[in-house]
Image: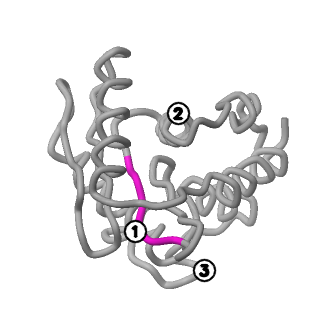
């Protein structure tokens, strides 16, 4: 598969994984689902679910390290700025041989275009927040979040799974 194939799937994920409503209970359910997936698979994750400006769920699993919370913060900043998944932004930049700093003047101390943060889109209000994991390779972080969203929405994850790793 090519990077273009990857970006096509990411665009479909971003446009079609839509919540009817998103409140504190939805955030708890989504965060708990990610926690349960991480525990079952032995992943050393930090999980964060938020509406922009308000953290609604956060936990660190066994093996997580303090720096992962910094990665979460930086990934959240990317989604809040671009209203796209952090992995999608990163793949677009990689395709153009650029970086957030080169293209937008954004410092890497505050922004990370690495996989694992996905926008929360609602049917009535659009993008209102994001869900983030940190602790795995970026593609796996992204896929885990998409899998949990699919489970929460009752969607078939196989329809939204990324193709085999893209060639550069």
Distance from Cα at disc 2 to Cα at disc 3:
35 Å
Residue at left offset 58%, top offset 36%: 154
Decide: few, some or many residues near mark 2? Use Cα within 10 Å; few <14, some 14-19, many ≥20: some
Please name the residue shown 70% across and 36% down the image: 162
Q: Which mark is residue 111?
A: 1
User: What are the residue bounds of the magenta stretch?
Assistant: 127-132
SS at mark 2 in the image: helix
Where disc 3 sits, the SS reads helix
Is 90 situated above or below 153? below
Q: In terms of image quadrants, where is residue 80?
A: bottom left
Mark toward the start of the polypeptide (2 vs 3): 3
Residue 42, position in %: x, y? 31, 16
Q: Is residue 98 left or right of residue 41?
A: right
Q: Is residue 51 above or below residue 156?
A: below
Badge 3 local density, few (<14 within 10 Å), some, or many (20+)?
few
Q: Nearer the viewer, mark 2 or mark 3?
A: 2
Q: Earlier in the sequence, mark 2 or mark 1?
A: 1
- Residue under label 3, please give it: 103
Could you say where residue 76 lies in the image, as x and y percent from the top left?
38, 64
**In the current view of this chain or complex, which residue is farthest to the bottom?**
105
Asked if the residue at tag 1 contacts the one at tag 2, i.e. Cβ–Cβ closer than 8 Å, the answer is no
* Along the line of sight, the residue nearer the viewer: 50 or 137: 50
- Tell me the quadrant of the picture where the C terminus can be found: top right
- Magenta span has 131? yes
């Amino acid at each position: 598969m090519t990077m273009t194939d990857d970006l096509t799937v990411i665009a479909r994920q971003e446009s079609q994984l839509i919540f009817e409503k998103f409140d504190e209970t939805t955030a708890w359910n989504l965060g708990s689902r990610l926690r349960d997936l991480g525990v079952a698979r032995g992943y050393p994750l930090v999980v964060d679910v938020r509406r922009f400006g308000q953290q609604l769920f956060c936990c660190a699993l066994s093996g997580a390290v303090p720096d992962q919370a910094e990665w979460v913060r930086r990934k959240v900043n990317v989604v809040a700025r671009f209203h796209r998944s952090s992995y999608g932004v990163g793949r677009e930049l990689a395709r153009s041989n650029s970086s957030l700093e080169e293209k937008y003047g954004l410092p890497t101390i505050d922004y990370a275009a690495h996989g694992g943060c996905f926008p929360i889109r609602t049917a009535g209000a659009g993008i209102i927040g994001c869900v983030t994991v940190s602790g795995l390779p970026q593609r796996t972080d992204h896929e885990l979040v998409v899998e949990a969203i699919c489970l929460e929405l009752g969607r078939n994850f196989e329809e939204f799974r990324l193709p085999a790793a893209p060639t550069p």
